[in-house]
Amino acid sequence: MSREIVNAVCRTLPGAEVSDPWGGGHDAWKVGGKMFACVGAVMPGVSVKTDSEETAQMLIDSGVAVKARYLHRSWVNLPWGTSEEELRHRLVASYQLVRSSLPNKAQAQLAPLGTAPATLCPAGGRGPVRQAAERDGQPHRRLPQPRRGRRS
């Protein structure tokens, strides 16, 4: 993994832009003005946003990532030794997380994701549950989600 691979992956994501907000050779990748990945000038690796502090801690505990310095606890730093498949997956997941948090108007102005993330994610964007179901020849069924809103 290297800065060139990170830049190549991020460049394919709709609306992704790179900047150097702090000077000194940082690559901050943003969508809609919000950062989803950052390659620092000193710390080796790329920092990405995760969906929660728990996910970040799980990645740190499993040895996949380390804590990203100067960023919120939901961010992790993937060292340069991370596999390219894992790197691509985490970059796309971070991008999708940040993109989904943008206002609807900003999201509508971006090109549709199309098939790009599925080709970048391992196993064509299918998670381990769906992979296991497909392997066993059974259809994957989504569990019902609890209803949100007021109770009657």
Image (spheres, helix red, strand yellow):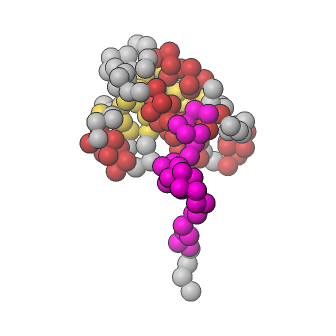
Whether 72 is drawn above or below 130: the answer is: above
Image spot of residue 52 (x, y percent): 40, 49
Q: Is residue 26 visible?
A: no
Total labels drawn: 0
Query: In which image quadrant can residue 107 be found?
Result: top right
Residue displayed at 48% across by 49% down: 128
Residue displayed at 55% across by 78% down: 150
Q: Residue furthest top?
A: 24
Where's the C terminus, which quadrant? bottom right
> Does residue 143 belong to the magenta stretch?
yes
Residue displayed at 29% across by 41% down: 62
Whether 26 is drawn above or below 30: the answer is: above
The stretch in magenta equals 119-148
Image spot of residue 143 (x, y percent): 54, 67
> Does residue 34 belong to the magenta stretch?
no
Query: In which image quadrant can residue 41 be found?
Result: top left
